[in-house]
Amino acid sequence: MTINYSIDSILTKVVQGDQEAFGTLYRHYRTPALKFCIYLLKDQEDAENMVHDVFIKIWDKRAQINPTLNFSSYLFTCLRNTAFDYLKQLEKNQQLRQRYLERIDPIQPEEEDDQEVRMERLQLAINTLSEKRKLILLLSIEGGKSYQEIAELLRISKNTVKNQLVKAKQLLREKVDLTLA
């Protein structure tokens, strides 16, 4: 395929909000961006998600792009930084899981039933939370996302995320403690 357009002119249109030009820009850089992310992450699916996320951020911040500067350098710097942040978060989650497992005493066979009952009660308590609180709680605990990441994802303030998590955990403690008494 012969490229009969200049990236500068495409970028100028993207900055002006031209979605078709953005599609052209995406198609032009998708394959090299994907190869770069696969090299860093060693995972096809994570790499594809990261490329999509970075391009979404680029679209959201298109007004700040200077078409006269090297867009390729900008794109690959964004991809690299996002990949490093992702890998740091992944490592942090693994360390937290490891510390958690080290602190738990081995469960005795008779305690397994109690553990299952507690997990069922906890799940029932989680299901009583409002959808928003439940989503924030799951993003935090299962997704390993920070307050800031959740706030950006849900487009709410960081303080709202913190308050909702505090309230959710408080309600869960109360409900689980009441059922165990």
Image (tube, helix red, strand yellow):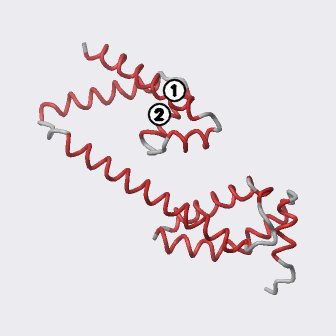
Question: In the displayed structure, does residue 40 sit left or right of residue 34?
Answer: left
- Give x and y (percent) for residue 14: 83, 62
- Give x and y (percent) for residue 141: 42, 39
Q: Residues within 10 Å of mark 1 (few under 14, many from 20)?
A: some
Q: Do the residues bearing badges 1 and 2 touch, measured as CB atoms within 8 Å?
A: yes
The residue singled out by tag 2 in the image is 137
Residue 60 position (above or below residue 21)? above
Q: Amino acid at mark 1?
A: Gln
Q: Nearer the viewer, residue 4 or 6?
A: 6
Question: In the displayed structure, does residue 33 sit left or right of residue 139?
Answer: right
Quadrant holding the N terminus: bottom right
- Give x and y (percent) for residue 139: 49, 40
Residue projecting furthest to the bottom? 2
The residue singled out by tag 1 in the image is 164
The residue that appears at 77% across and 70% down in the rendered structure is 25
Secondary structure beneath dot 1 equals helix
